[in-house]
Image (cartoon, rainbow, N blue to C red):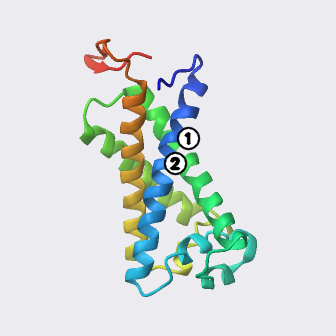
Amino acid sequence: MEMRTNDKTGHALLPALVTGTVASLASAAALAMLARVEGKGALQPINATSHWLHGKKAAQCDELDATHTLVGFATHFASAVFWALPFEFWRAGRQPASAKSLLRGACATSAVAAVIDYGVTPKRFTPGWELVLSKRSMVVAYAALALGLASGGKVVRSLTAVPGRPAKKRNGLAHPPR
């Protein structure tokens, strides 16, 4: 499967969807595990994300339902794709040559997301994890988001590589052709 588009905006949209999907699944899995470690229901952090619609009581729901879980996961997914966009713009412009560089960019993106999510965003529109999890677990959840972004970026990089064609050199670094 080859992912290519002609314009710069389009160049980041499909990759952001792939990267955001991986990041949302990785962070949702981490949120579930962290909640269980803290003695909470595995679905509570995702359900809490629906607090923008249902208020703080969303964090008390630990059952699978459309009202909280579907809305919460859809919100979480949209947020992960949203944060994958700047990451993919960064990645497309630099094409990191190493996993270390890719992880560094993902960590920077996740850190910016955390600062904006909990430092700038109005309380009603935060991820809602603070209603369920400790601050330590929230830091781990953002680390999982970073790992998901980096993993998604690697998936995108492998999908965009053209088999049999050597990577182009740009700024002295090898990059897959666009």
Q: Could you say which disc has been placed on residue 17 in the image?
A: 1
Above or below, comparing residue 69 to residue 169 in the picture: below
Residue, x 43% and y 71% (percent of image)? 138
Q: Kindly identify the amino acid type of the residue bearing the numbered disc 2.
A: Thr
Q: Position of residue 8 (x, y in %)?
A: 56, 22
Above or below, comparing residue 126 to residue 154 in the picture: below
The residue beneath circle 2 is: 21
Residue, x 37% and y 45% (percent of image)? 151
Q: Is residue 94 left or right of residue 130?
A: left
Q: Secondary structure at mark 2?
A: helix
Q: Is residue 165 left or right of residue 58?
A: left
Above or below, comparing residue 159 to residue 145 in the picture: above
Q: Position of residue 112 (x, y in %)?
A: 46, 53
Q: Are marks 1 and 2 in contact (CB under 8 Å)?
A: yes
Examine the image and state in which quarter residue 131 appears.
bottom right
Can you say which quadrant of the picture contains the C terminus? Answer: top left
Q: Is residue 97 left or right of residue 19?
A: left
**48 and 32: which one is in front?**
32
